[in-house]
Amino acid sequence: MKVRIKFKKDGSLRFIGHLDVMRFFQKVMRRAQIPIAFTAGYNPHMIMSFASPLGIGLTSEGEYFDMELAGHISSAEAVRRMNAVTAEGIEVISFRQISEEKKMTGMAIASAADYLVGCKCRENGAIFTQKMITGFLGQQEIVVTKQTKRSEQEADIRPLIYQMELTKEGIYLQLAAGSAQNLKPELVMSALCRFAGIDEASMAWTRRRLEMYADLASEAERAKGIRKLVTLEALGKDIE
Amino acid sequence: MKFSLKMYIILTIEFQFWLFKSTTIKKQTGEHCQIHTKPERNPMRKLALPDEILLNIEKPARYIGGEVNSVTKDPDKVDIRFAMCFPDVYEIGMSHLGIQILYDMFNRREDVWCERVYSPWVDLHKIMKEQQIPLFALESQEPVRKFDFLGITLQYEMCYTNVLQILDLSHIPLHSADRTWEDPIVIGGGPCAYNPEPLADFFDLFYIGEGETVYDQLMDTYRRCRQEGKSRLEFLEYAAGIEGIYVPRLYEPSYHEDGTLADFHPVSLHAPAKVKKQAVMEMNEVVYPMSPVVPFIKATQDRVVLEIMRGCIRGCRFCQAGMIYRPTRERSVDTLKQYAKAMLDNTGHEEICLSSLSSSDYSGLQELVTFLIEEYQGKGINISLPSLRIDAFSLDAMQKVQDIRKSSLTFAPEAGSQRMRNVINKGLTEEDILDGAGQAFAGGWAKVKLYFMLGLPTETEEDMAEIAVLADKVARKYYELPKEQRRGKCQITTSTSFFVPKPFTPFQWAPMCPAVEYVRRASIVKHAFAEQLNRKSLKYNWHDAEVTILEGIFARGDRRVGKVLEEAYRLGCLFDSWTETFHNEPWMQAFENTGVDPDFYTLRSRGEDELFPWDFIDIGVSRQFLRGEWEFAMKETVTKNCRQQCSGCGAAAFGGGVCYEGQN
């Protein structure tokens, strides 16, 4: 049986990288005695797949990974047991059964994510205005330099920004996420700074991922720019 | 025969150094071991370092604390705050069992909160110096200087500049004499504390031996002194009265004209002439951490460590651990089975490792290993079995727990020729080695690692060349197998390190060589390898000679080399045990600037009766025994191990362990 786990990552845990979070959860599973399936061989390991790695420095209230169970456990019991043995800063929110289909794993279907970007130095980004953001989004294209480990690449990020607005808590963003296309919120923020003529070096961002989505729109709908986003959590159901 | 870790890689041997026992704590089992393991939920735990720094340094997770099983207490409800430091980077320090034991033991006391401190890596070091950020403990993120105690474990000589870094970044005066009650009591322990003299000026106290015995007494003394408003010096005097505690300030050395030690004596009535090593005698009763801290980032030892025994019966003459941890004491198999379960349950680790100086000498080994394999093999738990001699049982066990296609076996013959192995008392014949290798090859292994030492006393060029010859003979064993049983070429990797004479070993009298001579010896071995039949299956690596010389100076140094350390640190030396950060030039500059002659400590032959800086410590093993062993070494005579025949080393005075096996 496949399950999807949703968790929060808060506080100082923002400095723990993706691979270490994976190792952390492998140990949580053992401490909580969740019946997890192992691969065969001399070094059996847990089959665990994360929807989308979270960068160092970001907190999140909507992280996901999928796992394979070897036995039955109810959702409520699993959440209770895992939270009893976690570290301060990581909290399991849900533990739900998902489809067995390979193409339905979180990694395969994740296509968008919500972020909230705050600014620590001024009042939650109050130097930004909704008008500024409307102007920013009104551009034909927003070309930025994307840096990967090996190269730099120019890319138009405008189509990857699904929503962007000013809220009381900061700037809310809905961006493309997942293995096909992925946009990091800090890239959007530096493009916005450049657009608004703000010196980015003087800013210190707080970045929080809020949620992750799959897109259930058909090929035809996608071609027309229609998205039907549902949370990754909603694709699972609680185990009694 | 060993397939195992080499004795001189410090971190792979988990011998317990300053562990200690609390008389008030009852025997622990898996059930009642979770005292303060759950941190209080406080989402606003403030980090000492701002995001701007943490996001711009390597591995910020080294500095944030908050790991599973780390202990948080209310500072207002404890009397004593103890900062426990391993003066190296987090991943190394977190792998050390001794600290985990001490951390657990201190935190069982309601009146003590023990936290951890590690060396900031060079990137953060620079920032902390520039911005005057005080060094902090991981749990509370509060400055170390606020603490009552700063305990520093001394596991290898090349971390001494890191000790000064810890004091410097904590804004604690480097010299004990300059400290006041505004500063913590700085206490050292661990194997290097068996010759504390090079660090004498920097420490207020040293704890000599295993920590479980008298730390409680020290804590109680401290609490009383503070309540009664005693001065710092008064406290140090009381502490000197506790067995095993050495207060360097209360002793004074004097020197002969030739520079050797003339006299070393206490200058206070409170300080004993001899400081007695502490050893735990009730191995099944003593505390052991059932819920060790689980790091977020991968530590060097990312697994449960089961310490099956302390000490070693073998008596290799170069090995300090083999002498200072005498007598050999075992834990019972039943105790260890309970520990294994509790520790795996409480940490979630996917590997468990047996730890001792020589696991094959543990009398319950078969029962314990069989239990671990049966109980955990199917549950995705790896079982790691270091320090085993090769025999039918160990090969069978290894085949069950390892993927032999990928793994290599490690043998530590330590010396190439039989003559040399007799000198060092490595009770191992060439036949043992080749038989073991043959069995391993027949069992499917094709990769073997061999460890040797160069520069041992009496070593000849022939002994050096024999290293390559032995490696070749091991390879020949492989090619003797029928072709269909082989898997291509074998891979025999040989490494040599240079021998460093250590205090409290039979070789403490031995002179070292100049660096050029070490390099010459390595090149003799290298040339000998080039002449071997199977040279294409053989690989040879050797260690750096410059570090060896420094290690030798500080291993047998006296109080006068302390100023070299201070000068070297001032010149920028730090993380000297790391190849990437070690620089020899500033060290040489430091010797020149301080006028200390390094050759005095390394090249000189020490006379039979020379008073050594560490002679005021009583480790139980007598100097007379050590000298006898030195003479046996010169005669190439082997001494039997403790179980074959007692050699009367003196450790029986502790009243337990192997010395009394089979007696009631």
Image (cartoon, coloured by chain):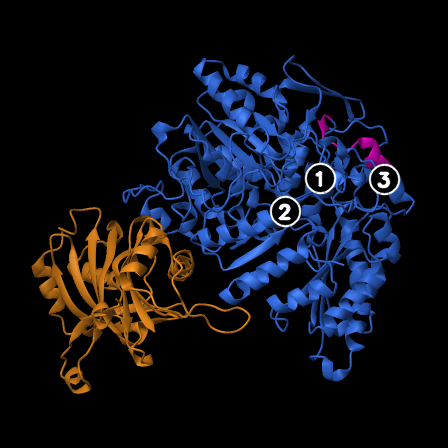
Chain colours: A orange, B blue
Q: Position of residue B83 (x, y in %)?
A: 47, 34
Specify which label sits upstream in the sequence, 1 or 2. 2
Q: CA distance from mark 3 to mark 2?
A: 34 Å
**Could you tell me which secondary element the residue under label 2 belongs to?**
loop
Residue at disc 1, secondary structure: helix
Closer to the observer: label 3 or label 2? 2
- Asked if marks 3 and 1 fall on the same chain, the answer is yes
Where residue B451 sits, quadrant-wise, is bottom right
Indicate left or right for B628 with B302 as reference.
right
Q: Which residue is mark 3?
A: B630
Q: Are marks 3 and 2 in contact (CB under 8 Å)?
A: no
Which residue lies at the image location 30% right of the left edge and 43% below the top edge? B41
Q: Position of residue B304 (x, y in %)?
A: 53, 53
Quarter of the N terminus of chain B within the rendering: bottom right
Magenta residues? B616-629
Residue B310, image quadrant: top right
Choose top left, top right, bottom left or bottom right for residue B471. bottom right
Q: Of the residues under marks 3 and 1, which one precedes in the sequence? A: 3
Label 3: chain letter: B
Instruction: Give the labeled residue for mark 2.
Output: B332
Q: List the single residue furthest toward the right.
A: B635
The dot on residue B657 is 1
